[in-house]
């Protein structure tokens, strides 16, 4: 198969979808891998690394899209990339379509087969999303702690406290992969951490594994009780493939102390607060109701080399399977891949996305004949 690796063009996105070692394995198996010049520079992989491992270096994205059958990316296609997608293309990347109807409709219009990393579900897990959730979760405690500094617009609270001064209070919404990692780092800093969760088995797991962290059942009453004393709130809510629920209203934000910080990891799925709007790494924060919001839509892109390697570890087996067998054949070997197909032949094939936008859903299995 002809596989294309374009340079990511979303603002401040420095990850690349494939490392040189994976290129070498694909080439060894007889596939042609075309990498856009400069694609790996943001993750400290030079063109020479890719060439040494058998990649064909091409000048621009247009050359990648024109020649490739399978296009592997990190982030959702931008307008210039959408214009180059054709029905014969297989697009493999993060999409987060439930939060973006315009992108959903544009992608449907291309007729391509679009497979989303974040909706491939294996035994109730999202294995291609988990590494980025781990990074974003760990980052959230770090950036939240930093922005609590007075010169950053925060209230001047050191999360770890000092002898004689109580530590700062952190509230984490959601005890999944991102929430667990947020709580782990916040606890390591020395903060007083509470995780809100709705799954009782998950709460038992957190109680056993997260010494020094409290768990509370997630509902509006409990959240309203915690917010007035919170220095940092981390939104780590995830509904598989769907738009994030708005757990924090503007009125609830007013309960929080002035200068407190809210980090919304769920921003890619629309965010879990009424006041969430996507920001970028070069302008990451804004203030609403006296609360500093950090809502960067591609948080792991800040640690691009680590994130690239972690992402490649989990996407590589699926990329190889699709390259070897095509989409239909890959689904026969790993039926879980069906859950990753979001669009095919102009049809919307992910039920949560269809429900989010009120659009017709088509079973992807019916389009693989």
Image: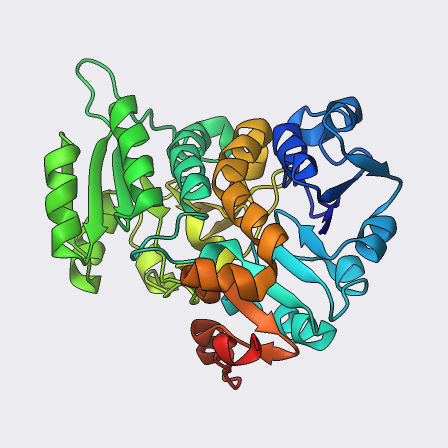
Residue depicted at 12% across the width and 52% down the height? 201
Nearer-the-camera pick, 72 or 98: 72
From this view, report whether residue 188 is shown above or below residue 280: above
- Where residue 94 sits: x, y (%)? 56, 54
Nearer-the-camera pick, 87 or 342: 87
For the question of whether residue 281 can be seen, the reply is yes
In the rendered image, the residue lying farthest to the top is 163
Q: Please give the count of numbered marks on the rendered protein.
A: 0
- Where residue 125 sits: x, y (%)? 33, 53
Tell me which corner region of the image, top left, top right, bottom left or bottom right, holds residue 112: bottom right
Residue depicted at 22% across the width and 43% down the height? 229
Q: How is the image coloured?
A: rainbow
Nearer-the-camera pick, 138 or 60: 60
Give left or right: position of 212 versus 256: left
- Where residue 241 sits: x, y (%)? 43, 64
Give left or right: position of 239 versus 85: left
Give left or right: position of 277 versus 207: right
Residue depicted at 60% across the width and 51% down the height? 324
From this view, report whether residue 361 is shown above or below residue 296: below
Give left or right: position of 187 versus 350: left
- Where residue 45 sits: x, y (%)? 69, 25
From this view, report whether residue 113 is shown above or below residue 117: below
Nearer-the-camera pick, 326 or 284: 326
Residue depicted at 36% across the width and 62% down the height? 239
For the question of whether residue 270 can be seen, the reply is no
Q: Quadrant of the C terminus?
A: bottom right
């Amino acid at each position: 198969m002809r596989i294309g690796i374009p340079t990511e063009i979303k603002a401040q996105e420095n990850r690349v979808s494939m490392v040189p070692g994976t290129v070498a394995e694909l080439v060894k198996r007889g596939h042609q891998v075309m990498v856009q010049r400069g694609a790996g520079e943001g993750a400290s992989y030079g063109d020479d690394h890719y060439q040494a491992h058998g990649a064909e270096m091409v000048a621009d994205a247009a050359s990648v899209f024109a020649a490739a059958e399978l296009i592997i990316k990190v982030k959702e296609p931008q307008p210039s990339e959408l214009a180059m997608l054709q029905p014969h293309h297989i697009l493999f990347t993060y999409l987060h379509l439930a939060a973006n109807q315009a992108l959903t409709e544009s992608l449907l219009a291309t007729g391509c087969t679009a497979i989303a990393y974040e909706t491939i579900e294996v035994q109730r897990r999202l294995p291609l999303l988990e590494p980025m959730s781990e990074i974003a979760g760990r980052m959230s405690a770090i950036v939240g702690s930093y922005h609590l500094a007075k010169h950053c617009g925060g209230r001047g609270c050191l999360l770890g406290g000092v002898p004689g001064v109580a530590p700062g209070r952190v509230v984490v919404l959601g005890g999944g992969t991102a929430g667990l990692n947020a709580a782990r780092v916040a606890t390591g800093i020395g903060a007083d951490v509470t995780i809100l969760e709705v799954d009782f088995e998950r709460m038992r797991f957190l109680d056993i594994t997260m010494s020094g962290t409290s768990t509370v059942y997630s509902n509006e009453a409990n959240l309203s009780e915690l917010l007035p004393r919170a220095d940092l709130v981390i939104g780590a809510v995830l509904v598989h493939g769907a738009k994030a629920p708005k757990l924090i209203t503007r009125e609830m934000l007013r309960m929080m102390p002035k200068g407190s910080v809210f980090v919304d990891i769920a921003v890619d799925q629309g965010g879990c607060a009424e006041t969430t709007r996507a920001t970028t790494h070069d302008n990451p924060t804004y203030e609403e109701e006296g609360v500093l919001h950090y809502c960067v839509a591609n948080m792991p892109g800040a640690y691009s080399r680590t994130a690239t390697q972690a992402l490649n570890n989990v996407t590589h087996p699926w990329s190889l399977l699709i390259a070897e067998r095509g989409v239909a054949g890959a689904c026969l070997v790993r039926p879980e891949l069906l859950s990753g197909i979001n669009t095919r032949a102009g049809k919307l094939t992910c039920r949560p996305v269809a429900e989010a936008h009120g659009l017709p859903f088509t079973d992807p299995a019916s389009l693989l004949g």
